[in-house]
Amino acid sequence: MVAGGERYFLRLYEEQDFGGARADAALTDELRRRGVPTPATIPGADEGKGSVEMLASKPAVLLQWARGEPSCQRAVSPARARAVGEALAQVHRAGVGLAASPGRFNPDALRRRLDAIGSSRLADQAPPLRAALDRVVAARAATPTGLIHGDLFRDNVLWDGDRLVALLDFESASIGSYAFDLAVTLLAWCFGDGFEAPLMRAMVAGYESVRPLEDVEREALWNEARLVALRFTITRITDYALRTSGTGVLKDFRRFQARLAALEAMGPRGLRSLVGL
């Protein structure tokens, strides 16, 4: 939108209530103050209430316009992958000490979604997903935790050429495993017809240039990546496939099943080799 000759971005919160929206806006403003490239919120009419207003019965916030474009998969180069890895590590470092929710996609929440899938037209998907989730959760190791983005997909990063302009949409930010968040980003950016080693190595190298991984994180990355693949398979079934007449063309859960199959085939050593660890 344009006001007073300036361009702004109006964001409606579809899943957060007013309190959740205020917490999200405050978090992103604090991350910006700590050096994370994310658009600033514009104060509302009543500055005592912060930047969040109600619009059409939903919380809304006005953001500064970020001049940039999201990347298509074909445009993801090693330079861009490295920049995303650096930016993700910057979020992890900047978020130290900040409060956030425990997240909406923990294993118990995923199991409740599997219950819903089990009574749907895609019921045949539920048993193998549940068995895989149980195996992965049982194999999880304790790894360093803190503030994570949780959803750093291509549509949440803006570019000016190969210069990263802004990180967007911290609505899924929570306290969680840094290794899990890195795995989210690897699976989001580095998979075309299969995993692309040059992109994965560049992203991990970029991440480690800002925040070196601990040994336990290196060991846990494969299992965390499997959990990521399951998380997005399950949520894409419940949030997209079951809400359409087909399987969800725009966000097809089968794309993350393909990632899971590739991870299972390569094993933990294969993933570590692929990302250069």
Image (spheres, helix red, strand yellow):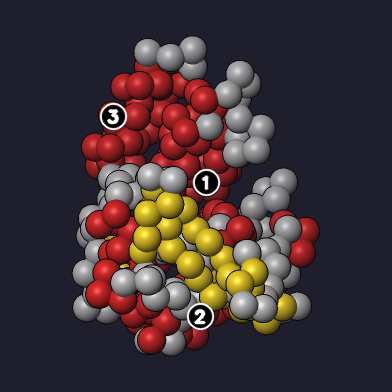
Relative to the observer, which residue lies in front, 118 or 238?
238
Point out the tag, 1 or 3, that comes first from the N-terminus: 3
Residue 114, picture quadrant: top left
Q: Position of residue 29 (x, y in %)?
A: 38, 77
- Residue at coordinates 49% horizontally, 85% vertically from top-left? 209
Classify mark 3: helix, strand or loop. Answer: helix
**Dot 2: element:** loop
- Label 3 packing within 10 angstroms: few (<14), some (14-19), many (20+): few
The residue at which mark 2 appears reads as 37
Give SS at disc 1: helix
For the point 58% across and 24% down, the residue is: 244
Label 2 packing within 10 angstroms: few (<14), some (14-19), many (20+):
many
Q: Is residue 190 above or below residue 30?
A: above
Residue type, numbered disc 1? Leu
Gap in angstroms between the C-alphas marked 1 and 2 = 31 Å
Q: Amino acid at mark 3?
A: Arg
Q: Which residue is mark 1?
A: 263
Residue type indicated by callout 2: Pro
Q: Is residue 133 visible?
A: yes
Q: Position of residue 141 (x, y in %)?
A: 25, 56
Q: Is residue 200 left or right of residue 18?
A: right
Q: Nearer the viewer, residue 113 or 202?
A: 113
Which sits in the foreground, 231 or 160? 160
> Quick check: marks 2 and 3 in contact, CB under 8 Å?
no
Tell me residue 221's x, y (percent).
41, 59
